[in-house]
Amino acid sequence: LETITLEEALELFKLPRDLGTFEGTTVSIGTGRFGPYVLHNKKYVSLPKGSDPMSVTLQEAIKLIIEKRQAEVERHLRKSGSRSQEAS
């Protein structure tokens, strides 16, 4: 179990916090059971280990959102490719 200072604990009460909008939808930062995350359009993106959720900018959050989308597309394509190879 990790320990945190009073100042760190008080900072966590500032979450979730809105960063702005991307594609007409609010982008916010929060913390949950699995650590800090970005929330956009009902989808969650984990922040990299060591990232401070209080210092993440909108641009950094958008970059993480786009990277996760690309990873999901690639994963879907790999799954589709392996299914079509099994069918042949």
Image (cartoon, helix red, strand yellow):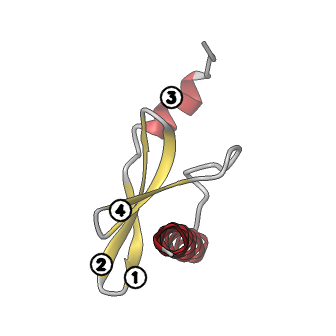
What distance separates the C-alpha of mark 2 from that of mark 3? 29 Å
Q: Callout 1 environment at 10 Å: few (<14), some (14 to 19), or many (20+)?
A: some
Separation of marks 4 and 3 at Cα, in angstroms: 26 Å
Residue 25's tag is: 2
Q: Nearer the viewer, mark 2 or mark 4?
A: 4
- CA gap, disc 4 to disc 1? 13 Å
The circle on residue 9 is 3
Which of labels 4 and 3 is toward the front? 4
Q: Earlier in the sequence, mark 2 or mark 3?
A: 3
Q: Give yes or no for contact between labels 2 and 1 (Cβ–Cβ under 8 Å).
A: yes
Left-right relation of 83 to 53: left
Query: Of helix, strand and loop, which one carries label 4?
Result: strand
x and y, in percent, of residue 29 in the image? 44, 56
Q: Amino acid at mark 4?
A: Lys
Q: Are marks 2 and 3 in contact (CB under 8 Å)?
A: no
Q: Which residue is mark 4?
A: 43
The outermost residue toward the right is 50
The answer to whether marks 4 and 3 mark residues whose Cβ atoms lie closer than 8 Å is: no
Q: Earlier in the sequence, mark 4 or mark 3?
A: 3
